[in-house]
Amino acid sequence: MTAEILALDHLTFYVSKPEFWRDWFCKVWGFVRVGMQAVQSGNVTFVIVDQPEYLSHHPAGVGDLCFVVKDLAAVRDLPEVQILSQTAEQITIRAIADVTHTFVQTPQFSAQTAGFMGLDHVVFNVPTGTMTELSAWYQKNFGWSIQAHYQISGEHTALRSCVLVNATGTVQIPLNESASPHSQVQEFLEHNRGAGVQHVALGSGAITDDVRRLRERGVKFLMATAESDLDAGILIDRHPQYPEQYLLQIFTQPIFGEPTFFFELIQRCGQRQGFGEANFRALFTAIEQEQQRSLTAPLAVSKLV
């Protein structure tokens, strides 16, 4: 028995100054307020709250992923999940380390006409040796499959990754684990004090315009260099057989006070699916170079303007 996940409804950020960060997302990223605790841009919604228990163990970041499921009762019947709380309308379970998953049958927010197209994917960094077990947990309980495996090596470090996707292809969760000592994944785990969400990819319909606007408002981006580097750090990765299908991607520097969570902007052109290994490698190299340069010091943090 599995619980079929239909969509990723929203993410919940745990931060120590939620009102500050709600304002930051609105003033810098162009989100709008939705109710007391949420901000929204297009089909992307973030709930931003203080969670002292979580923040006593981890820095600010994504603490919960809320999914829309076909049948909420199916989640209750899963034998290998730990239910933390439940009501008639939703269930929250333990997922990866202290990051939880919440399930609802009815979408909690209505999309806006303008803004980001959606949550393209959410990436977790996990301890070495746990990626296979965690991917099997998603497959067994939610019927997900592995879309791809990657082994990425840089000058100093390496990582392994697998990309999980739900049955309808609407939710993608890559899992990364270290494949070498002192890797960027291990650095994340040390600063995050355990596994967690490394970055969230926001779907864009006009990435060049979005990047220009965000830069003007103070957002700092990693300068990933590659032969496919388009413009101002935006990477292009073309399908080897269908060049009209390509990805455009760029990555911010960490937005909180430690080198942990960051955002990706991604534009899929010509119905390009999956992930570009060249861009993945370019991101890995950029983080590795920053890691060597800073010797684990925090990267620059975007500021309110």
Image (cartoon, rainbow, N blue to C red):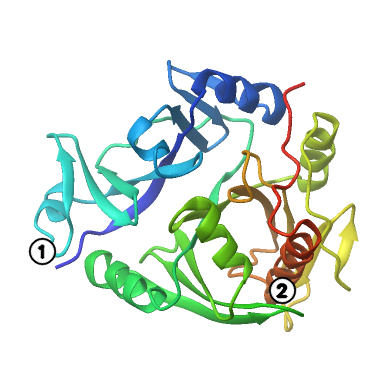
Q: What residue type is labelled 2?
A: Arg
Q: Position of 2 compared to 172: left or right?
A: left
SS class, disc 2: helix
Whether residue 221 sits left or right of residue 179 in the image: it is: right
From the viewer's perspective, is residue 287 above or below residue 44?
Answer: below
Report whether 218 appears left or right of 276. Answer: right
Name the residue furthest top.
36
Residue at 77%, 65% in the rendered image:
292
Quadrant the C terminus occupies? top right
At x 50% / y 51%, what residue is drawn? 192
Q: Which of marks 2 and 1 is nearer the N terminus?
A: 1
The percent coordinates of residue 228 (x first, y second) are 85, 70
In the rendered image of this protein, does residue 103 appear above or below residue 233? above
In which quadrant of the rendered view does residue 179 lie?
bottom right
Name the residue located 14 percent from the left edge and 55 percent from the top edge: 74
Q: Which residue position holds label 1?
A: 79
Q: Is residue 252 left or right of residue 128?
A: right
Under mark 1, the amino acid is Pro
Task: Give the x, y percent position of residue 118.
Answer: 55, 45
Which picture quadrant has residue 90? top left
Determine which residue is flagged by label 2.
281
Nearer the observer, 207 or 158: 158
In percent of the image, x 59 and y 62: which residue is there? 187
For the residue labelled by badge 1, is the local secondary structure a helix, a strand or a loop?
loop
Q: Nearer the viewer, residue 63 or 292?
A: 292
Quarter-wise, where is residue 271 in the image?
A: bottom right
Q: Is residue 108 visible?
A: no
* CA gap, disc 2 and disc 1: 38 Å
Is residue 156 visible to us here? yes
Q: Residues within 10 Å of mark 1 (few under 14, many from 20)?
A: few
